[in-house]
Image (cartoon, grey):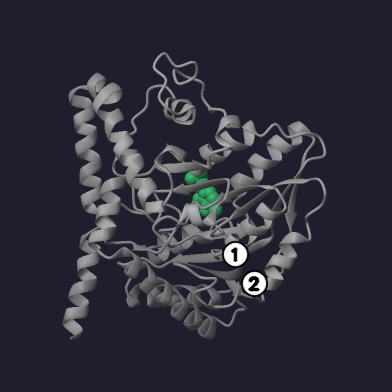
Amino acid sequence: MFSIILGRMKNWKDQFLLDSEITFLNFGSFGACPRVVFEEYQRLQLELEREPVRFITRTGMNLLQDSRKALADYVNCDPDDVVYMTNPSYAMNTVIRSLELKSGDEILSTNLEYGAMDRTWNYYCNKAGARYVRSEITLPIADKETFLSDFWKGYTENTKVIFISHITSATGIILPVKEIVDEANKRGLLTIVDGAHVPGHLPLDLTELDADIYTGACHKWMMAPKGASFLHVKKGQQQWVDPLVISWGYESDFPSHSQFLDYHQTNGTRDFSAFLTVPKCIEFMEEHDWRKRADEQRTATVERANQFREELQFTPISPLTKEWLGQLFSIPVQPKNPLDIQQKIFSEFKIEIPLAKNEDRYFIRFSHQVFNESEDFEKLLSALKSLRDRGELRFE
Ligand SMILES: Cc1ncc(COP(=O)(O)O)c(C=O)c1O
């Protein structure tokens, strides 16, 4: 029995290309490609180089339609409402720049958002004289009701838009976006969800969620090569979303049935092979019953979180349940020297794990992926204890 389990675990590591010298506990920053997905990526790039014009202007464009349809099927939306973009920052810049914010307008968000998104909102709000309002979420989160009440405290008659992460970055928690989107829809607000971490991590049904705008990364938990993400915009909102880069899709000589697709699929010359691997990622996930695999990792994350809390004595920032935790867990820490602790953990213990910052608090955030074994977490625990004993890290 034991050897069967070990055999299975070993098998998972063989499916990826990761450096065997490194304990990889940071799937959340950038996912790793399964071997078969990376081979597909290289096959496509080779095809591109064999006849660049044919690929970029004809065959590749057909594959792009197929890939968009496969993605739409995976996240349950109309294929005409979703376009590939390089990353969620690109997608959100596209949307926020198009918003035509007016002086006094307010965007309601939380103080748990991704730093690059905060900066994008600040930039465009500063230009327009609008306000980016970050409701302060009480930590530790007690329950959903308290969270929702904290969130809506920032609402005023000037609120026009709500913006929220589906899974937060530094704090690694799942937020109750469905409840927020439903309430915002009732109040007639534009709803924008940053789901960078969600595809391949949590089951995602964009039709059911019913947000106006949603962005997700394919190169994290869906395991695509880097530079594959998407922007979903509901019909009825697409007409005001301008392309970030104006190109041949504007005033197109060969318009398709959708201005949204024309505008956002043409950005000048680029290698879009990463987008085209998404059907292979989906195939890989289906072959391996990924919903079940991801759910197993989620259960394991909760167990590990409890183990780490007992051993290191800290106060978690949310209940340690599957309602709040997916495959990420953020341990609150106080590093003596925040600038070098991540590099120290890497060079001394050969563990890839981020030190993440949210406002003035720091977190060591681990990811739990199929190939992570008990010994990876034992190694992390022992590294954290050793740093604590040397006075380099405190747990709060
Ligand atoms: C919540 C969240 N939003 C967005 C992003 C995407 O960032 P980028 O556009 O730099 O890939 C991330 C990346 O980690 C994230 O965690």
Above-or-below relation of 95 to 309 = above
Residue 343 or residue 5, whichever sits in front: 5
Q: Position of residue 383 (x, y in %)?
A: 45, 73
Q: Secondary structure at mark 2?
A: helix
Amino acid type of disc 1? Pro
- Tell whether 384 sits left or right of 339: left
Q: Nearer the viewer, residue 191 or 344?
A: 191
Q: Residue at x 48, y 76 (%)?
A: 386
**Image quarter hosting the C terminus:** bottom right
Q: Which label belongs to residue 176?
A: 1
Note whether ligand 1 is within 8 Å of mark 1: no
Using the image, determine if residue 360 lies above or below residue 139.
Answer: above
Residue 227 appearing in the image = no
Question: Is disc 1 placed on a helix, strand or loop?
Answer: loop
Question: What residue is drawn where x is 52% and y is 77%?
Answer: 321
Of all residues, the one furthest to the top in this rendering is 253
> Marks 1/2: CA distance?
7 Å
- Which residue is at 49% across, 77% downward? 305
Q: Quadrant of residue 100?
A: top right
Q: Position of residue 72 (x, y in %)?
A: 39, 46
* Mark 2: amino acid: Lys
Say if mark 1 contacts mark 2, CB within 8 Å: yes
Q: Quadrant of residue 20?
A: bottom left
Q: Nearer the viewer, residue 143 or 70?
A: 70
Q: Is residue 362 left or right of residue 247?
A: right
Which residue, given by chain and number where applicable, does mark 2 sit on? Answer: 144
**Other-residue count near label 2 (Cα within 10 Å), few / some / many at <14 / 14–19 / ≥20:** some
